[in-house]
Image: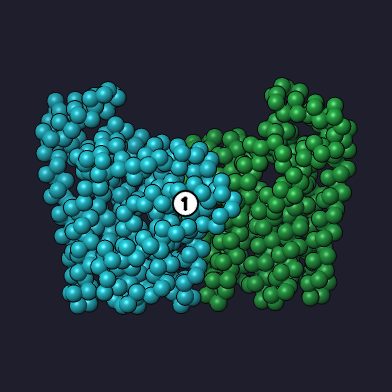
Chain colours: A cyan, B green
Amino acid sequence: MLSFQELSTKFNQLFDSDQFPTSPSSLYEPGEYFLKIGGKRIRPILCLLGNELFNEIHPDSYQVAKAIELFHNFTLVHDDIMDEASLRRGQQTVHIKYDANTALLVGDVMLIRAYEFLQTIQPQYLSKILKIFNRTAREVCEGQQLDMDYSKIKDVTLDQYIHMITLKTSVLLAASLEIGAIIGGASESNCKHLYEFGRKLGIAFQIQDDYLDAYGNAADFGKEVGGDIKQNKKTFLLLHALQVANIEQKAQLNLLLETNDDDKVEKVLSIFNACGVGAWAENLKTKFMDEAFAHLESIAVVEVRKQPLVALANYLMNRNK
Amino acid sequence: MLSFQELSTKFNQLFDSDQFPTSPSSLYEPGEYFLKIGGKRIRPILCLLGNELFNEIHPDSYQVAKAIELFHNFTLVHDDIMDEASLRRGQQTVHIKYDANTALLVGDVMLIRAYEFLQTIQPQYLSKILKIFNRTAREVCEGQQLDMDYSKIKDVTLDQYIHMITLKTSVLLAASLEIGAIIGGASESNCKHLYEFGRKLGIAFQIQDDYLDAYGNAADFGKEVGGDIKQNKKTFLLLHALQVANIEQKAQLNLLLETNDDDKVEKVLSIFNACGVGAWAENLKTKFMDEAFAHLESIAVVEVRKQPLVALANYLMNRNK
């Protein structure tokens, strides 16, 4: 059995070679540029770990892992256009380095390339895996749409936000694990528990992400700290602050949401601090982690096989980027 | 055996119902809007005709036909963003009626939905069909990229243009036929001839499209006539005119390409006419049609089965929209 780190090294070696044909370079070179920026590549490793939980890793899992990472990068390239983000992982986004039309098409071709890797796997589970992949891909788009919708309305409940995050982030983590498990020959029930583990982990992951956007260190984080605050993005932190703030704090917060002054981030953070938002987020994250681990425990394999997943979950929850 | 018209009616009945889930409506309603604008829906019918050439139409062909039409609409929605087109089939494009972000995501989800329909077909040919579909989808993106690249350079040869058109338009027509043929149980050799028939037909189709953009009637055509000329789009007509024009005409044409005056279309058309571009395009179209029909003749099935394809090809070449 390989650890998360070992699998990560193995996958990176595989994925750091070119993933596209060479021509036309005006299309594929920007694609390679974005893929080579790197990133944590958690999702493909989750697929490999899902397989390894039940069986030795089958070569098909590497193909699917590549498909998943390409899919994830497709969403990032297109999200960056929609969010008008200039930096990703500390580097220029595709639509900034090239242009919006190129970024649009690069995203499209990444998605198609993902299906090209999927298509190579054994026919016995191709249809089943394709079904999960497709449903998940569509859910991720729904999540992005809800994210844009919610950015335009004032009152978003925590439940709505969690639903959006589940679609936008969690289901892909969950599906990555489940697809790996299918290749590993897992039972239906084990697959379901692993999916739920991933789904809960994903929500905890997003809480951490929102936290880092407000409280992280720019150099570690690879993108601008306070970006969410500047863009008035609904986050776990903002939604909770709006819920628990006193009348004065709430008025101040709503006023800050209308402005774009230089000290906006600083002032919003001071209200967050006064509302104890950081500690609340930590608790909520722990709650989802506990639920995730309960599902992991329900999976009928010997405990030792679960260790790499436990290690990964703990790493993700204590990361600073 | 059903005619093109009968298959068209059958497919339209199937496709005019909703193709997406209902929620979130902010994502799926714009998708349904665009699909319901209609269009000629040639590609899905080609798939059905490809099946019918060899065998009774299998229900899987309808699923693939839907996938192909969704894929085609995905490319239209994204191309309209890139080309900043305001009208499609006489109606507002998605990014105009809604906004660019919505259009981007609607296109994405159309592509994914296409794969959801594909995924339902029988495992025995799923992998094979997926492979053709993926390769074709990627080629279409390459064609769009080359189209954008060529719009920025001055000298594009006819061969380069035909290569671009092959990728952007022909391969999807060809693949639609071939995939239908695979479901119909056609031999490798018959599949290849049918693909080549579609590829040549596609080039002839584009010549007709370029011709209609310059010489069509706006009400029939469903989009602005002369749009290609206004945008200095490389077309069969422009490339040929630049090749055969005398020094004076060429200078005039190059000057017109620099301007955007109200009478630009009129003036460019008068040079096209002086250069005999219309008749030349007609001849070139006939050449590709002849080559297409030679491939159709090589297909080893009784002639009567080929009649619907012959009828369709003739219809496409004599259409006014």
Quarter holding the C terminus of chain B is top right
Which residue is at 41% across, 63% downward? A14
- Horizontal side of B195 relative to B84 (left or right) equals right
Which residue is at 86% across, 44% downward? B280
- The residue nearer to you, when weighing B275 against B52, is B275
Q: How many marks?
A: 1
Please state the chain letter of the residue tagged with numbered disc 1 in the rendered image.
A
Rendered location of residue A108, percent (x, y): 51, 50
Quarter holding the N terminus of chain B is bottom right
Residue hosting label 1: A32
Rendered location of residue B198, percent (x, y): 73, 60
Q: Is residue A137 visible?
A: no
Task: Sort mark 1 into few (<14), some (14-19) or many (20+) by Cα contacts within 10 Å.
Answer: many
Which residue is at 47% across, 66% downward? A118
Location of residue B51 with respect to B277 vertically, above or below: below
- The residue nearer to you, when weighing B82 against A39, is A39
Secondary structure under the numbered disc 1 in the rendered image: helix
Q: Is residue B176 visible?
A: yes
* Image quadrant in which you'd find residue A54: bottom left
Location of residue B229 with respect to A130 vertically, above or below: above
Rendered location of residue B92, percent (x, y): 59, 36
- Horizontal side of A80 relative to A103 (left or right) equals left
